[in-house]
Each structure stands twice: as structure tokens, then as C-alpha cells.
Amino acid sequence: MRSLLLALLAATAPLVLGGCMGSLSKEGPETLTVDRAQYGEALDAAARIARDMGYKVAVVDRSNGVIETDPRHAGGALEPWRLDNGTADEVASNTFANRRRRIRFEFVPVGVPPTTPTQDGVLHGAAIPGSTAALQRFDVQSSTGPIEVTIRVTIERSFLEGSRPSTYSGSLASRWSNPLNAKPAGAADDSVRDNPRWVPVGRDAAYERTIAAKLEAATRAQ
């Protein structure tokens, strides 16, 4: 199978690389700042850009300035219509491995230091709406200065636990089992084990720059 994929990738390289690498750019800004008056429009634009790029928006938190998407499968060489890769290495990686991306936007007022958790901190749960704790909670919407936008595109790879593939031949592949995953005999446990498991392996800088350029253009148009 590996040899077949290599041959197919070599045969279709001009078409694949011309298509799969056509929509990403490294020309977008590394950092992006919007005026406080543009915060609502910028947040809506970020969610719209994520949807236009094929992602399902899972979280939109206007108070904390956070948008998160569900993960989306990363296209490889066998999907030349997927214009979501910036280099040939990414095309190959997404072809020979099961990989996906997820997007996170963070809107943070400039100059506001992040909250550092303490070792002896106590979690009290969510503040009751209208309570003093709720009114004192930090809210991006009540900020008065410029807001910095951070865009993170995380690449995750699927690792099938128990599988030990061979780089030479499928006949040399083997499997192993993790005894810690076995349920005790007679245990009333209906939990589901996560298999395969998705592990973050890096960030996609070209994808982040592309989104930043789209968001910058959207905020300038407003």
C-alpha cells in the first residue's frame, strides 16, 4: 500500500501540488490588532471565516474572547480539490498519516497580563449570573483599549494504540495490547476508550497567516 501511494503521489505531483497548495499564504500578519469598537464585528468575522474554510464552530465566547472549532480532516495528495496545504511536506504528511486541524481564536486586550493559576487555588465553579463575582469577572466586551487577536491552528495526528506498523512490509507489522486498558472482571463500567487517539503534533503557521490575512481584510472593510 505504501509503495502504491508513493507511486501515485509521484505521478500526480504537478496536479496535486498545484491544487493542494493553492489557497494558503505566508503573507498574512504574525500579529493582528483591532480597535475596541470593532471587537464584535471582528469576532463575527472570525467565526464566518472558519465556517467558510469548512470548519464547524463549536464555541463562541464573547465575554472571554474565544472562538474554537471542531477538528477537520486535513486533505492529502488523493484529494487535490482540498486547497489547504502550504508545502509539499504537508501534502505528503497528510497523505501517509491521518491528520486533522482545529482553529482557536483568542481576543485579548493589549496590556492585560494572563491569569496565572496557583498551586493552592480552589475551583468554586461558575459564578452565579448577577452576583458580585460575576460582575467582577473580566469581560473583553468591557475593555476600552485595542484588542490583540491570536490565531492558533493545531495539527493533530491519529495514533492507533497497539499498532506497530513496519516501514518495509505489511507482513512485518505487529500489534500489542495495553493491560491498563483492560476492565476488571465484573466491573460495571460503560466508559468508552478513545481509540484511535488524537495527539497534537504542531501548529500550521501558513494556515494561521492565511486566516490572519482574511480577518485583517474583513476588519478593514468594516
Image (cartoon, grey):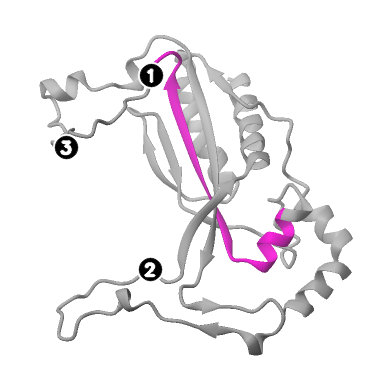
Q: Residue at x 30, y 72 (%)?
A: 192
Q: Are marks 2 and 1 in contact (CB under 8 Å)?
A: no
Q: Which residue is most to the bottom?
A: 171
Q: Any magenta on residue 105? A: yes
Q: Which residue is most to the top?
A: 144
- Residue at which label 1 appears: 113
Disc 2 or 3, which lies upstream in sequence?
A: 3
Residue 105 lies, with reference to residue 191, above or below; the image says: above
Query: What is the x, y in percent for residue 105?
Result: 48, 35
- Residue at which label 3 appears: 123
Query: What is the x, y in percent for residue 56?
Result: 48, 50
Query: What is the x, y in percent for residue 97?
Result: 63, 66
Q: Are marks 2 and 3 in contact (CB under 8 Å)?
A: no
Where's the C terminus, which quadrant?
top right
Residue range (magenta): 90-113
Could you say whether the residue bearing mark 1 is in a helix, strand or loop? loop
Query: What is the x, y in percent for residue 108?
Result: 43, 23
In screen coordinates, is 171 left or right of 45?
right
Q: Any magenta on residue 61? A: no
Residue 36 lies, with reference to residue 63, above or below; the image says: above
**Mark number, residue 194:** 2
- Mark pair 2, 3: CA separation: 27 Å
Q: Residue at x 46, y 73 (%)?
A: 161
Disc 1 or 3, which lies upstream in sequence?
A: 1
Could you say whether the residue bearing mark 3 is in a helix, strand or loop? loop
**Amino acid type at mark 3:** Leu
